[in-house]
Amino acid sequence: MENQNSVTESVTKTAKIQVKLILTHVAAHLDEVMAIWELPRFGLDKFEGFTIDKLRFVENDPEGGDVRYDAEGIIPIGVGYGRFDDKDSDGKRKPGVCAATLVATYLGLTGNRALETMLAETLRCDTKEGVKSTELAEIIKTSHRVLPGGNGLVVRWVMSALDAVYAQLQNQIAPGMKETGAPDLFRERQKNGDYTDERSAKSVERLFEHQGKSPFELDFAVRAMQRRGDSMADVREFANFAFERMYTDQERFHKCVDFVKKVKVNGHFRADDSKEDSFTVDFLAEIDGRRWTMRCMVLHTDAKQILRAANYRDREEKGAARPYELLVIRHSTGHVQVFPHVSCPLPLNQMVAMIRWLDGDRTVKAQPWASLMEKGQIPTVPGWYYSDKNQLLNGSDSHSGVKPTGLMTKEIIDIVLQAFTSKDVNKWKGDRSIGQPNNRPENHNRPQGNYDNRRVEKPQERFQRGGRPVGKLGQRPQEGVVELRGRNNTASELDSAFPR
């Protein structure tokens, strides 16, 4: 077993920072928890008094920089744009790093295979797609959804898992004869009648059927605890924390799936947690020189599982057309998130610029148009974050303190209808004299020009008319436009052009 102290020999000798406060964002991710786990174990010659009881959670980034933080004994992790934040001061993601790897680099941690394995897995989970629902990174997110406000409880649970995983990776203990994995422990709970919703219980079972080989799998942590000698009572208590969250999450997920299906089939439907109808609307988009009619699904709901539910297709739906190409989610707080479907390469850059321009003040309207398309957040419109995953976010679970946009849903959909063809973008900009600084209208905070053919109809109007709108609302596609969606289509030309 490698000596823990050997991994800190390369750390430059400096005065220790007296830790008074540790900060990370609400709904902390695996990389922040891993960073918090690393510091008291490997950073004792850099930090003094680093204990978990000093951890606090913030909704927005603190200000001041590392000089102020060090002087005041504050250690921000994943926030504050300091040494342990994987975002630059402009909100852009630093490539190839996460909070945990930044801590390891700062402490000079090298030559520890167990730690290096955990860091590599943390970075993968933080930056790559395809993380399994049974891995710690996803169980963390699941727990935050199910336990809002339970930040400290989730962090402590994950750190107990990291202790066991690290010990197993270091010691490579062989499995015992009576070792029980996480799937078997879950089935025990089922036999005891603890989970009464059969659909949700089977969903959790299927998650375990597709678990991977990562050391951050729940099953790996459960077995690691047994191999280091933990009592089965403690192992069950640890596993049950995850099972309860996973099962409850699946219950809520299936309710969201049912809701999305009703919106898809009926064209409009109202969720129990909303006073507004959710609905679908079609828009034109240019991709690779061709014009397509696409569907935007607008969902008014606070359900945490709604994005995953909108992308879900059960066995009966295999081969059917996508439920949407663009998803707009509006919460009761006024916050908005925009997601293109993962299998549709729909560029959001013009839409991002239009939303930022419309939501900003006169300072924003004087900026070059290209600057409004930049990734991350821009200082003049900090409420909108354009992610590297081609998503536009006005607030999120980990940044709940972001001010909601002042734009109405109608204004956002009006932009959707005009943001994806060059002709419509140019007209939208021309109506507001964008690019003509000496001829800008006095009142340009809201849409200008003639929108008679672009108005967003109430769902009832569209369906009284029959069918779904194609192209401009109420009109058929122009010549040369591919009609992507028919009323009874089960597949589309675009589906074959861009595989799921």
Image: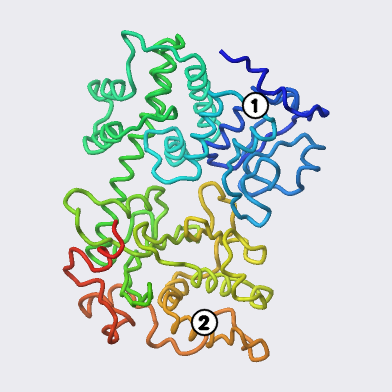
User: Is residue 13 in view from this perspective?
Assistant: yes
Q: Residue at x 19, y 53 (%)?
A: 318
Label 2: how many Cα within 10 Å (few below 14, some 14–19, many 20+): some
User: Is residue 275 in view from this perspective?
Assistant: no
Total marks shown come to 2
Q: Residue at x 33, y 34 (%)?
A: 247
Q: Position of residue 314 (x, y in %)?
A: 22, 49
Q: Nearer the viewer, residue 492 or 332?
A: 492
Q: Earlier in the sequence, mark 1 or mark 2?
A: 1
Label 1: how many Cα within 10 Å (few below 14, some 14–19, many 20+): few
- In the image, residue 298 above or below residue 178: below
Question: How are the colours assigned in the image?
Answer: rainbow
Q: Position of residue 201 (x, y in %)?
A: 26, 33
Residue 416's image quarter? bottom left
Q: Tell me the quarter of the image containing the C terminus.
A: bottom left
* Alpha carbon distance from label 1 to label 2: 51 Å
- In the image, residue 121 above or below residue 383: above
Q: Nearer the viewer, residue 274 or 492?
A: 492
Q: Which mark is residue 53?
A: 1
Q: Which mark is residue 304?
A: none
The answer to whether marks 1 and 2 mark residues whose Cβ atoms lie closer than 8 Å is no
Q: Secondary structure at mark 2?
A: loop
Q: Tell me the quarter of the image containing the N terminus.
A: top right
Q: Amino acid at mark 2?
A: Pro
Residue 23's image quarter? top right
Q: Residue at x 58, y 37 (%)?
A: 32
Q: In the figure, is residue 486 to the left or right of 271?
A: left
Q: Which mark is residue 447?
A: 2
Q: Residue at x 76, y 46 (%)?
A: 65
Q: Position of residue 51 (x, y in %)?
A: 67, 25
Residue 75's image quarter? top right
Q: Nearer the viewer, residue 288 or 199?
A: 288
